[in-house]
């Protein structure tokens, strides 16, 4: 079977890749940033083998000659990226992880939204005592902000920071989102609404940072890598350049090289991390209080089809990379609230666990199930709680409107049942 003809986008980027990546300064910049990071070249639509790393700057051009169009790397910093494997468990990964950078990925359908939020986050980071911040254009309609691992303390309360990926960077990202939310609403409202007294609470959802990026072995576009869809370069910016940045400033043939990795001071992000952890602890504590046993009786559905379940729950059931304990808490309370029989309930939980990148230990699952059986039924957390964001799930507007996964499931089940009854009645009338 013949290969399909390349698209216009592919033709456009392939026209400049060899010329662009042949430049020694581009090769050097990408190579320097890649040190101790897992990297993966992208061949327009698909990624190359993993794990991979660069040994020499010239490796970049050799990969381009084989068809590579862009280069991506990890937030995590490793002793030897080539030792990585999907067979490694958390403990083994911690043993070879040196540390991690905080990488905030801000993306939107509108670059003006992305620019506004990048400015807000940078100001917040500075307010939190961080003086050295890296900024770059994503290559499309967003920006990447980096706080290097050097800026974070090596440990807190005898817990090694390097071992706390992705939990701690996720907590920090959630904390930043929460603390800058009101300012984002105000600034985006100014962009979208002529009446300044009418706040736009929906628009900020277009620019929520990508929490999926903060997950094990997830990759992001390297500085000065090209972008397949736009043929623009992921250029590094100074804070002063962000305000007036235009897409034409990322023309790969006109860029000037800058260093994406700022020269951070040791521990300058300590205050940010401590405040984020305190905030998360208090926030999680309040959620637990809100989840006190209630006099809630399970709702018995005749047949629980996956199509009735909320999109967020369906995503969780596909398996998660991290946040497995929170995901288990959500599923246990949902399935118990829906009155699923014990055998079916445990079967669904075990099937879900097998899909996780690193399954939870059976002993832990059994203890959680046992604890659940000994206590009253509790509704799963509402969609507006940080349980979902904490595992990389962004609830839909419909889910937020219906508030709780149980409400959503019951409504969908009722709608399907009602449609079935209508069809049945019509059939009886015809007879």
Image (cartoon, rainbow, N blue to C red):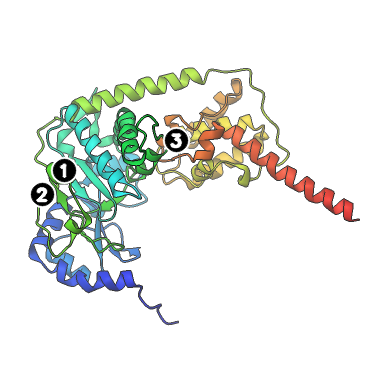
Q: Is residue 75 visible?
A: no
Q: Is residue 352 left or right of residue 274?
A: right
- 206 on left or right of 272: right
Residue beneath disc 2:
259
With 104 as the anchor, is 270 left or right in this view?
A: left
* Residue that carries the numbered disc 3 in the rendered image: 388
Could you tell me residue 26's position as x and y percent? 12, 61
Circle count: 3
Q: CA distance from mark 2 to mark 3?
A: 35 Å
Element type where label 1 sits in the image: strand
The relative height of residue 296 versus residue 260 in the rendered view (above or below) is above
Residue at horizontal 38 percent and vertical 78 percent from the top:
5
Q: Of the two numbered discs 1 and 2 on the same chain, state the one appearing first in sequence.
A: 1
Whether tag 1 and tag 2 are in contact, CB under 8 A, the answer is yes
Quadrant of residue 431 in the image?
bottom right
Q: CA distance from mark 3 to mark 1?
A: 28 Å
């Amino acid at each position: 079977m013949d290969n399909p003809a390349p698209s216009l986008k592919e033709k456009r980027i392939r026209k400049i890749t060899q010329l662009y990546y042949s430049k020694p300064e581009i090769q050097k910049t990408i190579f320097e940033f890649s040190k101790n990071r897992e990297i993966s070249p992208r061949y327009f639509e698909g990624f190359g083998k993993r794990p991979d790393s660069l040994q020499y700057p010239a490796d970049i051009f050799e990969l381009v000659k084989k068809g590579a169009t862009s280069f991506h790397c990890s937030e995590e910093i490793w002793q030897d990226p080539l030792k990585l494997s999907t067979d490694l468990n958390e403990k083994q990964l911690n043993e070879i992880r040196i540390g991690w950078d905080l990488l905030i990925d801000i993306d939107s359908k509108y670059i003006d939204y992305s620019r506004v939020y990048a400015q807000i986050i940078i100001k917040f980071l500075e307010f939190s005592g961080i003086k050295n911040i890296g900024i770059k254009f994503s290559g499309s309609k967003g920006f990447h902000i980096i706080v290097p691992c050097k800026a974070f303390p090596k440990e807190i309360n005898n817990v090694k920071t390097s071992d706390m990926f992705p939990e701690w960077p996720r907590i920090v990202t959630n904390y930043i989102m929460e603390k800058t939310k009101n300012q984002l609403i105000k600034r985006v409202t100014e962009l979208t609404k002529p009446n300044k007294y009418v706040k736009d609470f929906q628009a900020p959802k277009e620019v929520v940072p990508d929490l999926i990026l903060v997950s094990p072995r997830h990759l992001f576009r390297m500085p000065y890598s090209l972008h397949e869809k736009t043929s623009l370069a992921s250029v590094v910016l100074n804070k002063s350049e962000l305000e007036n940045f235009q897409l034409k400033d990322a023309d790969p043939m006109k860029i000037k090289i800058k260093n994406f990795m700022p020269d951070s001071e040791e521990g300058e992000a300590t205050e940010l991390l401590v405040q984020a952890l305190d905030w998360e602890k208090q926030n999680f504590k309040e959620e637990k209080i809100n989840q006190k046993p209630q006099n809630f009786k399970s709702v018995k559905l005749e047949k629980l089809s996956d199509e009735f379940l909320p999109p967020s729950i369906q995503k969780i059931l596909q398996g998660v990379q991290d946040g497995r304990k929170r995901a288990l808490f959500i599923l246990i309370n949902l399935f118990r609230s829906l009155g699923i029989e014990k055998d079916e309930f445990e079967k669904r939980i075990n099937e879900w666990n097998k899909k996780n990148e690193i399954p939870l230990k059976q002993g832990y699952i059994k203890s959680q199930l046992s604890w659940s059986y000994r206590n009253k039924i509790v509704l799963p957390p509402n969609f507006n709680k940080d349980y979902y964001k904490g595992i990389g799930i962004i609830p839909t507007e419909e889910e937020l409107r219906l508030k709780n996964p149980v409400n959503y499931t019951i409504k969908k089940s009722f709608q399907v049942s009602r449609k079935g009854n209508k069809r049945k009645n019509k059939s009886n009338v015809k007879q």
